[in-house]
Amino acid sequence: MIEIKVPYEIGGRSYAGLIVCDDDAAEAGRPVLFMQPDWYGVCTETVAQARELAEGRYVVLLADMFGTDYDAESKDFNQLLQGMLAVHKDLGFTLDCGGTAYKKMLAEAEAQGLITSDTPKYAVGYCAGGGFLMEQARAGEDFDALTVLHITNPNPVVPGTPCKVTGRVMAIHGSADPVTSKEMMTELETELTNAGAEWQTVLFGGAVHSFCVPSANFEGAQYDEKLCRKSYRMMHDFFAETA
């Protein structure tokens, strides 16, 4: 499997995204999958998720929103929460860092011959990464389709932000998610409807937060392998229908 680090700087701080794909990705013509991970950022677990998604399917572009010195695996819950909120509350940074990650990795993947300029472009966001991804999509980033998994912060951090979503949107969520309420999801659906976007929500009965995050194991958040596999199948089909 090919893995290429892509460095970039935001405000004098160092970041590094990661391109992940099969060795035959160039010959196979794999579509792009821009990945906004959860609040762990780029770490052992999220790289493993990127490898799983890439295998036989995509050229995955794993975004770094927290910096190369973040060391998420050494942080406790409150430290991870504060790190996530620092990004979430700064819309300018979210768009700058997320947009830079996307453009830098797209350019490098094309320079390496892994994709072409007209390769289909999809995106996936986990938890807080789903919120970051929605802000990018809201600002008009050029995704053909995107999926958010148990999204955190689905609504605009700056109320009244115009919604310029251009691609199809699928949200996969749990009915018992205590982090993101049904009311918040309804607001997202209304926003997308008013913007004229094509969208759909899949709601798993009784599921809580983070069912696609293997390490999730705290009150209100729990990994569920069965739901994760089902979510991925739905996402793959959703992207295939978009092509």
Image (cartoon, rainbow, N blue to C red):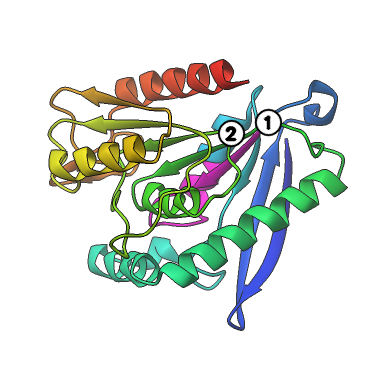
Tag count: 2
The kind of residue on which mark 1 rests is: Pro
Whether pointer 2 and pointer 1 mark residues with C-beta atoms closer than 8 Å, the reply is yes
In magenta segment, residue 166: no
> Is 172 on the left or on the right of 54, as rendered?
left
Q: Is residue 34 above or below residue 1?
A: below
Closer-to-camera residue (145/163): 163
Q: Which residues are magenta?
A: 32-48
> Is 198 on the left or on the right of 47, as rendered?
left
Q: Earlier in the sequence, mark 2 or mark 1?
A: 1
- Circle 1 is placed at which residue position? 120
Residue depicted at 74% across the width and 32% down the height: 119
Q: Of helix, strand and loop, which one carries label 1?
A: loop
- Circle 2 is placed at which residue position? 144
Mark 2 closeness class: few <14, some 14–19, many ≥20 residues within 10 Å: some
Q: Is residue 90 above or below residue 230?
A: below
Mark 1 closeness class: few <14, some 14–19, many ≥20 residues within 10 Å: many
Q: Position of residue 139 (x, y in %)?
A: 49, 55
